[in-house]
Amino acid sequence: DIQMTQSPSSLSASVGDRVTITCQASQDISNYLNWYQQKPGKAPKLLIYDASNLETGVPSRFSGSGSGTDFTFTISSLQPEDIATYYCQQYDNLRWTFGQGTKVEIK
Amino acid sequence: QVQLVQSGSELKKPGASVKVSCKASGYTFTSYAMNWVRQAPGQGLEWMGWINTNTGNPTYAQGFTGRFVFSLDTSVSTAYLQISSLKAEDTAVYYCARDPYARAARPFDPWGQGTLVTVSS
């Protein structure tokens, strides 16, 4: 099975900062990579699909990039409402794997 | 609107069984697959497997074979997760999540609100 290594596990940043999270796959997954946001006590919400496509209704400060094994998720200007845990998810051959998650906090 | 509504929280004793439901509305049930995801307290997301809503064929992730069963009732657009011989380590929130068969990375959207299953004597 494909393994996903997500980093960092947590980060603290100021409002307005640029925040970057990375995910590395154990083998080439093309662009089969999605990103989710999960706020405490809530279900995850899809933000980015196919590595770089912004889901409808998601603010443009969120973006994703990468292909193959290395992927990046960016919040261009951190807002208080972005406090959450973010997960990458890969899809390969009818199976999915999540990264370990990155908890984002306000400094 | 498209939504998945799950059944309520459950408190079970070790060795018992539980059946969680996930009722879909706002779309054609058989046009999308259904996945199940576990989240243990304070932990990350763990994909449990999925069920083909056209054929009823389930696929289970490693670690979720034997005691875990996915099923459907397409007449009421509902997917089910049954867990038997419950153990304390099954205590978790269980989510259902829809995925589109035809999209490249088959993202999960939307998700149900989650069902907390607590296993305690």
Image (spheres, helix red, strand yellow):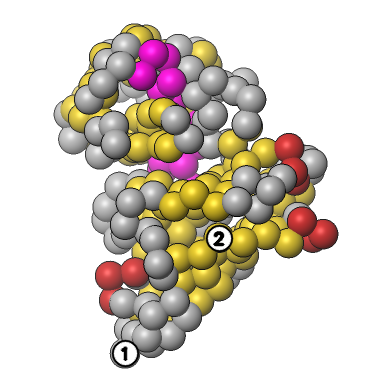
**SS under mark 2:** strand
Residue A19: percent from the left, percent from the top? 27, 18
When the figure is inspected, residue B50 is found, relative to residue B68, above or below; the finding is above
When the figure is inspected, residue B19 is found, relative to residue A79, above or below; the finding is below
Residue A45: percent from the left, percent from the top? 50, 36
Looking at the rendering, the stretch of residues picked out in magenta corresponds to A29-46
Residue B28: percent from the left, percent from the top? 79, 41
Name the kind of residue labelled 1 in the image: Ser
Quadrant of the rendering where the N terminus of chain B is positioned: top right
Mark 2 sits on what residue? B70
- Residue A102 is one of the magenta-drawn residues: no
Q: Is residue A40 left or right of residue B72?
A: left
Pointer 2 and pointer 1: residues touching (CB < 8 Å)?
Answer: no
Question: Is label 2 on the same chain as label 1?
Answer: yes
Residue placed most toward the observer, B42 or B91: B91
Mark 1 sits on what residue? B121
Question: Chain for mark 1?
Answer: B
Q: Residues within 10 Å of mark 1 (few under 14, many from 20)?
A: few
Outermost residue, right side:
B75
Q: Report the mark closest to the observer, 2 or 1.
A: 2
Residue placed most toward the observer, B87 or B119: B87
Q: Does the image show residue B62? A: yes
Label 2, label 1: how many angstroms apart (C-alpha)?
26 Å
User: Residue at image x 26%, y 14%?
Assistant: A70
Q: Residues within 10 Å of mark 2 (few under 14, many from 20)?
A: many
Q: Does the image show residue A12? A: no
